[in-house]
Image (tube, helix red, strand yellow):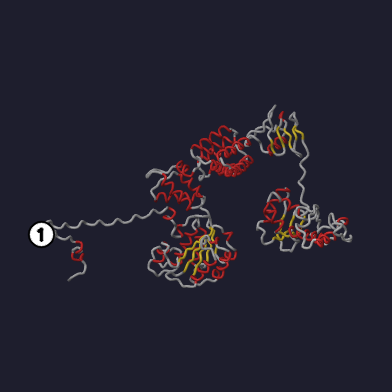
Amino acid sequence: MPSDSFSDLGQTDPDAIPEPPPEGPGLFGDDPVPAPAPVAEAAAPAQPYRVLARKYRPTTFADLVGQDAMVRTLRNAFAQDRVAHAFMLTGIRGVGKTTTARIIARALNCTGPDGTGGPTVDPCGVCANCRAILLDRHPDVLELDAASNNGVDNVRELREQVRFRPVQGRNKVFILDEVHMLSGPAFNALLKTLEEPPPAVRFIFATTELRKVPATILSRCQTFHLRRMSQAELMGLFGRIAGLEGATLEPEALAIIARAADGSARDGLSLLDQAIALTEAGSAVTAQSVRDMLGLADRTLVLDVMEAAMRGDIAAVLGHMDRAHEAGADAGVVLSDLAELTHQLTRLRTVPALREDASLPEELRTRGSALAATLSVPVLGRAWQMLLKGLEEVALSPDRRAAAEMVLIRLAHLSEMPTPGEILRRLSNGGPAGATSPGGGAGVPSGGGGSGALAQGGYAGEGGGVAAGDGGTRAVANGAPVAMAQPAPLPQPSHFREVVALASGRKPMLHAHLVHSVHLVSFGKGRIELRPRPQAPRDLAAQLTVLLAETTEQRWTVVMSNAPGEPTLAEQGRAVAAESLELATSHPLVQAILAAFPGAKIEGGVRDNSLDAYGLPPDLGEDPGLSEVPEDDAEGPGFAPPDAEAAGLDDL
């Protein structure tokens, strides 16, 4: 029986059979025509390299690392057919917001390998919809960048697309990345569509700035907070990916990359990609090579600098900084590493059990724990403050290295000084103020000669005598302590304006809100009741409570109320200014001037030196209104009585 298949007959394709060589001469000569040379098949074009962050992007919920709460909620929602029509995904960069949005889009449109499946939390990845979404070619899944499509016209175009049914998939999914970049009118244009979309439409928003998204938008979405990935999770993820890539990394190198990633998988994978490319093929990526790549100082070097600074050895500090400079470490990065080490040492000092934490580097658990045991928390706190201030100085200095060295010289110098609390404690116990105490560094120098070291409330002068400030304990020249009276309690605010004045210079933003954004309802000893205006921050009560505790050393209760209360201080000041201006305008002398010069007007208001910084009389008492003015000054300072005879031009 004949067959249409050459393979059934044991034969090959006729086109593949070579032609026999010619038996005689060719048409244009005696030589036979040579057979054409076989044409080599064109080599397949090499695929471009895909970075690790794209190559290993999660494609299912099971692949997401560190987002268990969100995955559990979505799994239950799909299982119970309670999938919302709008999601808001928020978190720092690189934690998987856009990736999660694409997985949700696939889960909504997956039809299964046989093409008959429904929405599932485990998309198959092989159906036409899954493949098209993975390749960013699905006609019903539109991914928009709200940073460049942030106008109201862009939202109107989106609304027009919402009206049409899906072309290929089950649902039409709109993914808006960085949605907080939309303008106010664009958000307003989206509200109605977002609240009542067609049945087959889903919105998925992603943002790193949730606080910039209007509450009217958030109330229409289910919000998921994608958390930062822990260092242990990142190390496990990077280790697995490095194994798949055939790369070997030292554990310390993985730890450095995980710390530098700061909770972001994408940032860490970019660093891992760079670290693998840094070394020769087949060689292990070392911790030192990663430090060189990131411009970090060696952890051992950072500990050397900290130990030298804490024992006041300035020469050793500068020598270690020279080593760091030769190794290519940036001076600002060294200070940043020192600040991080100070934080770790403080944790080890306050929670000794952390010394057994296996996640800490070995050198920090051993050598760092020993250093932390010799330092007190006040000394570490002072070092933290100086390093934070030093980072600002380095950022502003034209010579970063010189600025960093000046910061470390100051840190080494101050390490020799006891804290103010130690000075008072030693004096109270009858001991010399300059004694050395464990965990506090060297004491204030004493003995004949030498300049004293200044500290809060006291000084060390010649002869070893230390005098504490008012209300403390005084040590006379012969070293005998003399007990003095205890410090008097701090004065307490007697009315609201004194409370507001406490914030002036200390908390500028809080001070501005207390002047413009709150209405005083009641004021009593240790208790303030306020009605905030809409522009007031939500944590105003907490900020004010902390300020009062710091400045009065007393516990205050700040209550937010809906009662009307009195006008704000700014409104009261404007009322006083308006009344003063009206009073001045109605004065006969001013009336005569205005009549003599048509079109003239009073500019700049009326200045009254008796008013305080808020434009109010100095003592309000309990009356929220304006205070009474003395009879002899009822018409304002410097004005004649209102019944005085009007002046003429000749008099002027």
Q: Position of residue 310 (x, y in %)?
A: 59, 36
**In the image: residue 641, left or right of residue 505:** right
Quarter of the N terminus within the rendering: bottom left
The furthest residue to the front: 650
At x 20%, y 66%, the residue is: 6
Q: What element carries label 1?
A: loop
**Relative to residue 408, is residue 578 depicted above or below?**
below
Q: Position of residue 183 (x, y in %)?
A: 57, 63
Q: Is residue 170 visible?
A: yes
At x 72%, y 33%, the residue is: 466
Q: Can residue 352 be seen in this view?
A: no
Query: In the image shown, does 218 or 630 lie closer to the viewer?
Result: 630
Quarter of the C terminus within the rendering: bottom right
**In the image: residue 348, left or right of residue 1:** right
**In the image: residue 138, left or right of residue 33:** right
Quarter residue 113 falls in: bottom left
Looking at the picture, which amino acid does disc 1 mark? Gly
Query: In the image shown, does 56 or 326 lie closer to the viewer?
Result: 326
Q: How many marks?
A: 1
Q: How crowded is mark 1: few (under 14 residues within 10 Å), some or many (20 or more)?
A: few
Judging by the rendered image, the residue that carries numbered circle 1 is 24
The furthest residue to the top: 448
Q: Position of residue 202 (x, y in %)?
A: 50, 67
Query: In the image shown, does 380 or 635 lie closer to the viewer?
Result: 635
Q: Position of residue 137 (x, y in %)?
A: 41, 64
The furthest residue to the left: 24
